[in-house]
Image (cartoon, helix red, strand yellow):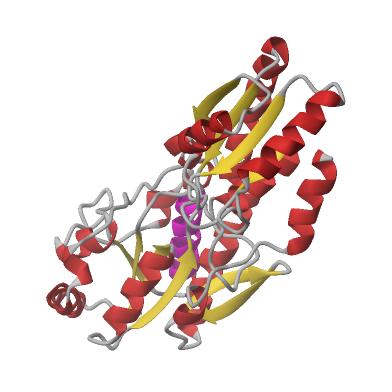
Amino acid sequence: MRIGVFCSGGDAPGMNACVRAVVRTALLHGHQVVGIQRGYQGLLDEEFYHNKNGEALMTPHCVAGWAQYGGAFLKSSRCDEFRTREGQEKAASILRKHQIDALIPIGGDGTFHGAVALADVWDGLIVGCPGTIDNDLIGTDYTIGFSTAVQTAVDCVDKVHDTADSHDRMFLIEVMGRHSGYIAAYTGISTGGEILAIPETPTDFPEIVAKLNELKQRGKTSILMIVAEGDEEGGAEILNEQLKKHDCPFPTRVLVLGHLQRGGTPTPEDRRRASHMGYGAVTALMRGETGVMIGTQNDACVSVPFETTYAEHRAIPQQLLDLVDTLAS
């Protein structure tokens, strides 16, 4: 079997470890691996990873030492052309041309939407791995990159906490999460943030200001507010202006962490999960599975239909939200 592997969408720490596991597992079982660069766009452009002999086949040497690096050595991108039926049919033709029997796309919901569309015009096997820092896919306890993104955010917030204490200020710190508050929730719990603004809960400015006044009366002099970029009221800058209009009792500053959260050395947890999923994807292909994502639940690999992974919003457990409120009280 000839397996194509690529990364798609936003890069996530651990993607390289996942590709390494795919290559090592496939070759051990006598299969070939073609590294496709720049995701669906690279597939359409026939841009393949070449080994030291100039062949468009990956060897164990190609992925040596990949696990400890962030980013995506196969590169990643988004592709408007592939969203069209013509682009999908072109991709299918290219896969047949290069005799690729199966694909392992590593990415998020957009990547999996693309995989489902491709399956309509191509009869190869497709098994994906969840590579996204947002942790917003259903069917896996954690996605590749989430652990590292939280670690990066926590490191930054810990440093900001020193400045907030030194100047008696409130900081609104915006973390990534266009549709999901997982990074914000985990960061808030880990750093002792007093206020959390996420898409999953309503952001009530009078209620927040009332809580801030209560904290100030109790002697609190500095505040951390963790904001998911996708909060229904807007990002940290917008929330800051609204809080001022509602007579926020603390002087405020805004910090947007942005793409900083995507980079950096993956945590051991992300490396382990990514490796487990890459291994699981190859073994699923060997069983003849297709149209599924390999997630992990209770540290075991599971197969979840692509459509299920993005069928609805992945809710944050109420127990986690209760924990945030309890620790900030």
Q: Is residue 72 magenta?
A: no
Residue 210 position (above or below residue 18): above
Q: Indicate the quadrant containing the C terminus: top left, top right, bottom left or bottom right.
A: top right
| Image spot of residue 160 (x, y percent) | 63, 22
- Residue lying farthest right? 218
**Residue placed at 43% from the left, 68% from the top?**
27
Looking at the picture, tell me which residue is in the foreground, 139 or 315: 315
Camera sees residue 22? yes
Q: Is residue 16 magenta?
A: yes
Residue 322 position (above or below residue 101): above
Looking at the picture, tell me which residue is in the foreground, 225 or 35: 225
**Residue placed at 52% from the left, 47% from the top?**
67
Magenta segment boundaries in residue numbering: 14-27
Looking at the picture, tell me which residue is in the foreground, 217 or 158: 217
Looking at the picture, tell me which residue is in the foreground, 266 or 329: 329
**Residue placed at 80% from the left, 30% from the top?**
215
Camera sees residue 156? no
| Image spot of residue 9 (x, y percent) | 35, 56
| Image spot of residue 205 (x, y percent) | 62, 42
* Residue 316 image-quadrant placement: bottom right
Q: Indicate the quadrant containing the N terminus: top left, top right, bottom left or bottom right.
A: bottom left
**Left or right for 142, reference 256:** right
The main secondary structure of the magenta stretch is: helix
| Image spot of residue 305 (x, y percent) | 49, 82
